[in-house]
């Protein structure tokens, strides 16, 4: 894959969920990857604990969804404690799975478990995260990028991706402004601890406790809760177990509850920032290195994982010879998403200042299934559409009766493009479509209605009313819709997405 003496094709800095997702996706594309982290090991706390439905679809494609469901659980009802009364409240409206949306509900999964699941998957792929490996500086030229480590090691790579958090060394090394604000006067303790005497069938909140918010969410498969205590301006908290136990007891005034077995604690400051750009030459950024959010709404980790999922196939294509301009579409598609998410999470966090139960309700957009790249650099609005879908929209799931596949997601799973043919003419023309060699291959499938009764059928879900071919990108978004001129309709796609005869590092 390389024509220059590189140590690795892509160096990923930061071995959290974002870096792990990117490394895992690149590895299955045959890209050589090194994954570094300055920490001594995997982050131990629960921190970001909500996995949104769209991220679960990403995990399905990467082969880790079943493990995530086994390690996580449903979000419980909230229990709002107001004096002696407790009011039940459902933050996330539970929805049954449907054929187009197999994972409709947010999964409660502590970040430490998400990280461990992705790390095990990467280990199985033959790549190990390297810890105690701090990057001191990054430089680049026209042919590649270089990382200088604190240890003195120098790593030469085709591309470097910084997934190294809000204080990203990679972002700073390429002088990308990180615009926004950090409110030092508004802080919250987040900790993992057991609380004896507190029921585990509720996410407990005490919204008006001595002028501050207190919450405790049960973590699945453990005896622990994620504890949240809003601090007063200027308060200097003691994060020891004895001090937190005493503070918790004083705030809720319930002597039957005892906090113990503290395993992790930190002070969170609302940090709302967005990088001015996501790429400078051979260096890119993703996740918290590109955007940081308040924790409200469980959006930050999910947005970062989907950054990596968008970037992975584009890096793979460029390394195989596709035009380097394809990497510019990463920022063009993902930065607007981050900007919208920043606004939403900030709105939800503001609700904690004067808590109202209505502010704890999550809506359709929070599930991130409605994210679309329509109108972006790879999905111009003049492209054909169906009754229900446009180019740039998420490709829904659906029940099918293909050999070895029961769902459309079975066909999409893997590092390839997928071309669907609905109707006899479109299906017959699948073999006539040309696709350049190298890079992500093209899988072709004729789609017929399932022999079983399904509601709706894939054709109905996809809004198909005539013979149609639908091209699905490797990240599960629609790249093209055609009702005629099957091969010609893909000409623009192959220009930007497919390798040429030239060799890239």
Image (spheres, rainbow, N blue to C red):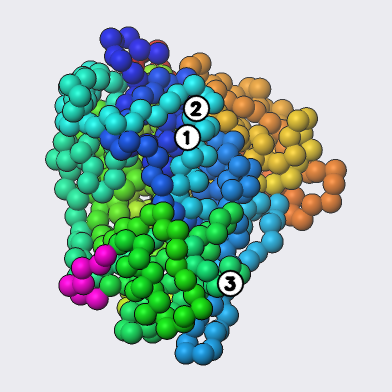
The residue at 47%/90% (across/down) is: 83
Is residue 137 visible in this depiction of the protein? yes
The residue under label 3 is: 199
Kindly report the distance in space between the C-alpha atoms of the residues bearing marks 2 and 1: 6 Å
Residue at 32 percent across and 68 percent down: it is: 243
The N terminus, quarter of image: top left
Q: Are marks 2 and 1 in contact (CB under 8 Å)?
A: yes
Mark 3 surroundings within 10 Å by alpha-carbon count, few (fewer than 14), some (14 through 19), many (20 or more): few
1 vs 3, front mark: 3
Horizontal placement of 329 versus 57: left or right? left
Q: Residue at x 33, y 31 (%)?
A: 131
**What residue is disc 2 on?**
123
Circle on res. 119: 1
Is residue 234 within the magenta segment?
A: yes
Q: Secondary structure at mark 1?
A: helix
Instruction: Answer above or below: position of 435 versus 271.
Output: above
Q: Is residue 106 left or right of residue 287?
A: right
Q: Residue 152 at x, y = what percent?
A: 17, 21
Residues at marks 3 and 2, CA–CA distance in whole angstroms: 37 Å
Q: Secondary structure at mark 2?
A: helix
From the viewer's perspective, is 146 left or right of 130?
left
Label 2 crowd (10 A; few <14 / some 14-19 / many >=20): few
**Residue 486, how many percent across, how many down?**
59, 31
Front residue of 133 and 397: 133
Q: Earlier in the sequence, mark 3 or mark 2?
A: 2
> What's the magenta region?
232-238
Quick one: label 1 or label 3, which is nearer the N terminus?
A: 1
């Amino acid at each position: 894959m390389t024509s220059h003496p590189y140590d690795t094709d892509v160096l990923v800095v930061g071995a959290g969920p974002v870096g792990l997702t990117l490394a895992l996706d690149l590895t299955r594309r045959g890209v050589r990857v090194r994954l570094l982290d300055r920490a001594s090991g995997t982050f131990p706390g629960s921190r970001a604990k909500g996995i949104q439905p769209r991220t679960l679809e990403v995990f399905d494609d990467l082969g880790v969804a079943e493990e995530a469901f086994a390690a996580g659980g449903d979000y419980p009802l909230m229990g709002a404690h107001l004096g002696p009364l407790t009011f039940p409240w459902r933050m996330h409206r539970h929805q049954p799975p449907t054929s187009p949306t197999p994972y409709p509900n947010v999964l409660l999964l502590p970040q430490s478990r998400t990280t461990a699941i992705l790390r095990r998957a990467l280990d199985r792929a033959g790549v190990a995260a390297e810890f105690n490996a701090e990057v001191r500086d990054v430089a680049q030229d026209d042919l590649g990028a270089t990382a200088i480590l604190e240890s003195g090691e120098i790593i030469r790579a085709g591309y470097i991706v910084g997934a190294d958090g809000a204080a990203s060394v990679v972002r700073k090394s390429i002088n990308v402004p990180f615009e926004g604000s950090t409110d030092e006067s508004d802080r919250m303790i987040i900790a993992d601890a057991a609380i004896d005497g507190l029921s585990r069938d509720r996410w407990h909140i005490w919204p008006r406790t001595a002028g501050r918010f207190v919450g405790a969410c049960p973590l699945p498969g453990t005896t622990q809760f994620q504890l949240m205590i809003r601090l007063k301006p200027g308060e200097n908290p003691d994060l020891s177990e004895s001090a937190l136990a005493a503070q918790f007891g004083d705030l809720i005034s319930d002597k039957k509850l005892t906090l113990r077995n503290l395993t992790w604690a930190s002070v969170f400051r609302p940090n709302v920032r967005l990088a001015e750009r996501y790429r400078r030459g051979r260096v890119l950024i993703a996740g918290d290195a590109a955007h940081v959010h308040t924790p409200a709404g469980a959006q930050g980790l999910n947005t970062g994982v989907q950054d990596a999922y968008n970037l992975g196939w584009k890096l793979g294509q460029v390394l195989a010879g596709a035009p380097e301009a394809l990497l510019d579409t990463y920022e063009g598609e993902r930065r607007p998403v981050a900007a919208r998410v920043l606004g939403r999470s900030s709105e939800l966090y503001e609700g904690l200042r004067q808590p109202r139960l209505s502010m704890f309700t999550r809506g359709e957009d929070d599930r991130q299934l409605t994210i679309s790249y329509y109108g972006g650099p790879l999905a111009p609005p003049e492209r054909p559409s169906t009754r229900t879908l446009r180019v740039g929209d998420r490709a829904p799931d659906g029940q099918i009766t293909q050999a070895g596949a029961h769902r459309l997601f079975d066909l999409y799973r893997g590092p390839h493009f997928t071309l669907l043919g609905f109707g006899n003419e479109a299906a017959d023309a699948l073999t006539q479509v040309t696709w350049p060699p190298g890079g992500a291959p093209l899988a072709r499938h004729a789609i017929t209605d399932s022999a079983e009764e399904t509601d709706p059928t894939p054709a109905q879900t996809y809004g198909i009313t005539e013979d149609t071919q639908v091209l699905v990108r490797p990240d599960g978004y629609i790249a093209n819709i055609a009702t005629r001129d099957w091969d010609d309709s893909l000409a623009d796609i192959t220009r930007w997405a497919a390798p040429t005869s030239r060799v890239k590092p």
